[in-house]
Each structure stands twice: as C-alpha cells, then as structure tokens.
Image (tube, rainbow, N blue to C red):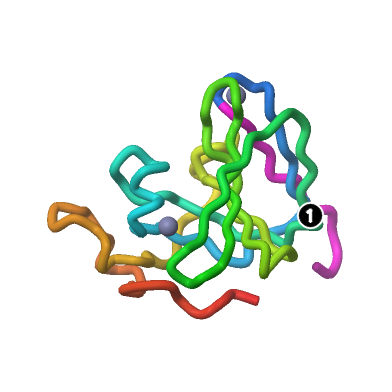
Amino acid sequence: MAGGELTPITGGCLCRRVRFSITARPMAMRLCWCRLCQYLAAGNATVNLVFPSNAISVEGELRDYASVAVSGRRMHRRFCPHCGTQLFSESEERPHLIIVRNGALDDIALLKPEATIWTAEAPEWAWIDEALPQHAGQPPPVA
Ligand SMILES: [Zn+2]
Ligand SMILES: [Zn+2]
C-alpha cells in the first residue's frame, strides 16, 4: 500500500494465550453459512476476513482441525487449545491466504462484511442482510 504506516489490526483468543497482529488491510470480509461454519459459530454464520498470510504474526499455541471442504480443498481450522476460540482457517492449496475470525479481533466493529456466502446451507430462520451480495455456495477466489 502506497504511503503512510498502517495501524496493525490486533486480536487474540478469549483467554489471551494466543495473540496476533496483522499489517495489511483485508482482501475480503464475508459471512459464511456453510454447514461447517455453523458448527464453529454455534449455529450462526461465521464472520471472516481474508488477509495475505505473510502479513500476520501470531504468538501462542494453536490446535488444528483438518478436514476436506466441499471444494475438495484440505482446510485447517486453528483454535486455542485452552479456551477453544476459533481464530484462523487456511487451505493447503492457497497458503498465501489466511482467514481470520472477526470475533477474535480486538475491535470487532472495525470492518463490515461485504457479502454472504453459502446461503443455500442456512436455516430458514437465518437473518441474511438483503443489502449485501449473496452467493448460494463458494464464491470465486479473492486472489
Ligand atoms: Zn485461549
Ligand atoms: Zn463456512
């Protein structure tokens, strides 16, 4: 980004054993209603920011749950082994990107989602913002 220092975006888990700092602006911010995210987010959509993975530094121990997504990609969901807070998601095929959960940011109101994805898997009662673009499934890659 041209000119000026970027204020890092900081965050971490509930128990504060894991902390991170990001020196980039997000490439995307989306709500995800895929079935797996509903497990992670206790029944709602996850709120996710996509960053270049080289812009984040992380301190503290993470556990990793690996699974194969509908896309066929092998995904790693990383969380704090002590308090269970979901922090990151990464795909083995796209290691240049890291997905950060908005709930882990120190300032959860810093940025706003610009799309809702996997709406086809949302329950009928789900509240989905009609003002945002929607994708029934996985949208095209951000980069
Ligand atoms: Zn923790
Ligand atoms: Zn999802």
Q: Check disc 1 and report the residue beneath it.
A: 55
Position in image of residue 14 (x %, y %): 55, 24
- Quarter of the image with the N terminus in it: bottom right
- Locate ligand 1 by image quadrant: top right
- Three-letter amino acid code at the position of disc 1: Ala
- On screen, residue 10 versus residue 1, left or right, reads left
For this orientation, the residue located farthest to the bottom is: 140
Q: Quadrant of the C terminus?
A: bottom right
Measuring from the top left, give residue 71's x and y in whole percent. Answer: 48, 72
**Residue 5 within the segment the image draws in magenta:** yes
Residue 77 in the figure: left or right of residue 18: left
Viewer-proximal residue among 4 and 101: 101
Q: Secondary structure at mark 1?
A: helix
Disc 1 crowd, CA 10 A, few/some/many (<14, 14-19, 20+): some
**Quarter where residue 74 is shown:** bottom right
Question: What are the residue bounds of the magenta stretch?
Answer: 1-13
Where residue 28 sits, quadrant-wise, is bottom right
Outermost residue toward the left in this view = 124
Residue 131 lies, with reference to residue 112, above or below; the image says: below
Residue appearing at x 67%, y 34% in the figure: 62
Against 80, residue 74 (above or below) is below
Q: Position of residue 98 (x, y in %)?
A: 66, 56
